[in-house]
Image (cartoon, helix red, strand yellow):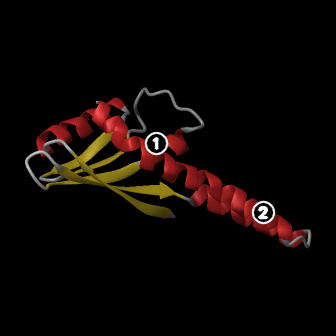
Amino acid sequence: MKFKYKIKRILKVRADVLEEKITTYLIKNSYRITERGSGYIIFVEDEFSDRRKSRYDFHTRIGEGKFVFNCSSDSETTVELIYLTSLSYYAFLVMLVCGFGIYTNNIIMPIVFSLALTTPILCKIFYLNERVFKEIMEC
């Protein structure tokens, strides 16, 4: 089960320079480019890389997605990042907590824990909204 999310920005850089910056960002952060075309780059996380993994990777990494960019003028480019976030682990935890709540006849506990388990997903969305394009422009 995957959740699809889009981030759209207008950046003051030419399309060819932006494409190079996106490629540099993806290679630097151990993503594998699976397909490249005129105006888009599709990528996935490179699971065979030597990158050190941490437990905060869910919050700070995209996983898989697609950059779509269109040149709106000579110095401005519209960029859209479409990425997929896996929700399977958190859905399993919510169902487990709900099952335990039904078993113990407690109605409030599953509601509270469900809200607590959605927090990491919201944190990831907010983090990526703020940081991805800043990191791309710094490459």
Q: Which three-letter amino acid code belongs to the residue tagged 2? A: Val
Q: Which mark is residue 135?
A: none
How many residues crowd around disc 2 within 10 Å: few (fewer than 14), some, or many (20 or more)? few
Q: Secondary structure at mark 1?
A: loop
Q: How many numbered markers are drawn?
A: 2
Q: Which three-letter amino acid code belongs to the residue tagged 1? A: Arg
Q: Nearer the viewer, residue 114 or 64?
A: 114
Image height of 119 relative to 109, above or below: above
Figure quadrant of the C terminus: top left
Image height of 113 relative to 12, above or below: below
Residue pictured at 49% horizontal, 41% vertical: 60
Residue 38 left/right relative to 63: left
Residue pictured at 38% horizontal, 39% vertical: 46
Q: Secondary structure at mark 2?
A: helix
Q: Can residue 137 be seen in the rendering of this structure?
A: yes
Image height of 135 relative to 125, above or below: above
Residue 111 left/right relative to 92: right
Q: Can residue 62 be seen in the rendering of this structure?
A: no
Q: Which mark is residue 112?
A: 2
* Residue topped by disc 1: 61
How far across and how far down the image is residue 66, in percent? Answer: 30, 53
Labels 2, 1: front one: 2
Quarter-of-image position of residue 59: top right
Residue pictured at 36% horizontal, 38% vertical: 134
How far across and how far down the image is residue 38, in percent? Answer: 12, 53
How far across and how far down the image is residue 11, in percent? Answer: 24, 46
How far across and how far down the image is residue 73, in percent? Answer: 10, 52
Distance, label 2 to label 1, CA atoms, is 27 Å
